[in-house]
Amino acid sequence: MMGIAIVFVYETTDPPDWDADGVPDASDNCPAWPNSGQGLPPWPIPVDDSDCDGFDDAAETFLSTDPGMACDDGLGLPDWPPDFDDNKAVDIVDVLALKPVFGAISVRHDLDASGGPVNIVDVLAIKPVFGAGCV
């Protein structure tokens, strides 16, 4: 038995640009947050926050949000920790999502990733991004 295989090799010199903002990942200050002008979002960016959403990757792993996706990508997994309704904005609805679990253990709502009950520290973690939207 004999077979013929055709192989196509495509070579590109374009460097990777995961967020498609026109800035190669190697020089992008936020490789998972589209910011072609390299301006940072208006909230503090902690060290080890690869998607520049204001929450470091370890906290996002704890919260079961996607540390490499700054905004809702429609795939079901929450992406931005304080955006509990995945509408790409942090507003009063997200703050009120903490009320039913306040004082209880809720990993998804434990925004400071302490492992303890949801408390005022978790509510205050929303403050820097309150009123903001993501792209």
Image: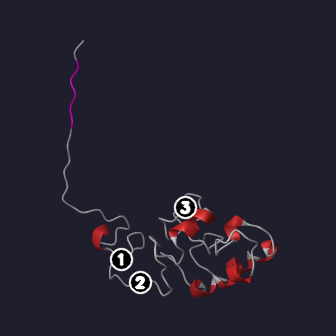
Residue 35 falls left or right of residue 84: left
Looking at the rendered image, the disc whose residue lies closer to the viewer, 2 or 3, is 2
Q: Are marks 2 and 3 in contact (CB under 8 Å)?
A: no
Mark 2 residue type: Leu
Q: CA distance from mark 1 to mark 3?
A: 25 Å
Q: Quadrant of residue 8?
A: top left
Q: Is residue 79 visible?
A: no
Quadrant where the N terminus is found in the figure:
top left
Q: Quadrant of residue 111?
A: bottom right
Foreground residue, 20 or 129?
129
Looking at the rendered image, the disc whose residue lies closer to the viewer, 1 or 3, is 1
* Magenta part of the chain: 3-7
Q: Quadrant of residue 83?
A: bottom right
Residue 9 drawn at (x, y percent): 20, 43
Q: Which residue is mark 1?
A: 29
Mark 1 residue type: Asn
Q: Which residue is mark 3?
A: 74
Residue positioned 74% across, 66% down in the render = 106
Secondary structure at badge 1 equals: loop
Q: Which residue is mark 2?
A: 40
Q: Residues within 10 Å of mark 2 (few under 14, many from 20)?
A: some
Find out whether residue 55 is within the magenta segment. no
Residue positioned 32% across, 83% down in the render = 37
Q: Please tell me which of labels 2 and 3 falls first in the chain.
A: 2
